[in-house]
Image (tube, rainbow, N blue to C red):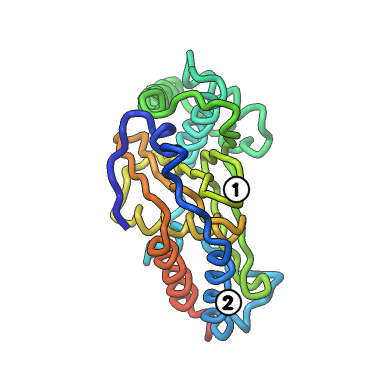
Amino acid sequence: MELAAAPTDVILSLRGQRDLRPRIDSGLAGGLRSWLEDDLAECASHLDPNEPLFLSPRAMTHEALSSVPPLSALARGALVSALCTQRLSLGEVNHPMDDALSALEADPAHAEVVDTVHGLDPDEFARLSSEVAAHDTVLARHLSRVPSSWLPRSNVRLSVPLVGGRVVLGTVVNVVLGAPSVNVASICLLHVTTSSLEETTAAMLSVVALIETLRSGAQPLRVASLSTATGEVSICDVNDHVLTQGVELVVRAVRARGAGQ
């Protein structure tokens, strides 16, 4: 899968020209699911559907288990995610730290992150505010306000159960654009990270594309990743090769975790 740097406006690059969008293969999602079900049937047969093996794109593309990020890093990510949502819906941000923190304070799910931010001493708070403002500068450069006709959604949770719920593929996508279509590929997915893009970014995007294809029954048009740390952007046109890579990564990840033992 080839990834290329995008023009300044990531949103416009994702949507592209309507008349150039590929037609949806109505049998593709079913074929991919059957392939996965067949390859995973034996190695996942002993798993309990009540305690499934949950796999995220990152878990499938990193051999070593990642350590849990410190709360400060989690807070930065949550704050930047909130700014991403605000820029897509309102088109501008006047006070990055204040606006982002206010958004998190309104969501009980982020209570721990909010407590962490409020617990910082003045110097730490100022440093985090400066970091958040720098990340927002990248968002401002790459994200335009999205027309409502593109049906923008923020922080969308995607989940797909396999082999009777014994394995669950899941991820949260920062930005989803487009309406489901039975004719041409329309959905675009954007992952925003506060870290640098990695060599595994292409593989991660292939799994995200696969999850959306299995979930909705239609392959997405494009998947992308934006680093607010560096301004790097990677955009991938979804095709059979990309989705095949995603299937192979899922099968390899389940087997690597000893699901058949």
Quarter holding residue 216: bottom right
Disc number placed over residue 181 in the picture, else none = 1
Query: At x 50% / y 27%, what residue is drawn?
Result: 83
Instruction: Choose between 166 and 213: the one closer to the eye.
Output: 213
Query: At x 42% / y 67%, what residue is drawn?
Result: 244
In the displayed image of the protein, which residue is found farthest to the top?
94
Mark positioned earlier in the residue sequence (1 or 2): 2
Disc 2 marks a residue whose amino acid type is: Glu
Q: Position of residue 198 (x, y in %)?
A: 31, 51
Element under disc 1:
loop
Element under disc 2:
helix
Disc number placed over residue 238 in the picture, else none = none
In the displayed image of the protein, which residue is found farthest to the right?
50
Label pair 1/2, CB-CB below 8 angstroms: no
Foreground: disc 1 or disc 2? 1
Disc 1 marks a residue whose amino acid type is: Ser
Disc number placed over residue 37 in the picture, else none = 2
Residue count near mark 1 (Cα–Cα under 10 Å), binned few <14, some 14–19, many ≥20:
some
Classify 209 as above or below 131: below
Q: Position of residue 114 (x, y in %)?
A: 58, 31
Q: Position of residue 229 (x, y in %)?
A: 33, 35
Give the mark count: 2
Q: Position of residue 109 (x, y in %)?
A: 65, 39
Residue count near mark 2 (Cα–Cα under 10 Å), binned few <14, some 14–19, many ≥20:
some
Point out the image quarter for the N terminus.
bottom left
Query: At x 44% / y 57%, what residue is drawn?
Result: 58
Query: At x 50% / y 53%, what residue is drawn?
Result: 23
Classify 121 as above or below 113: above
Q: CA distance from mark 1 to mark 2?
A: 25 Å
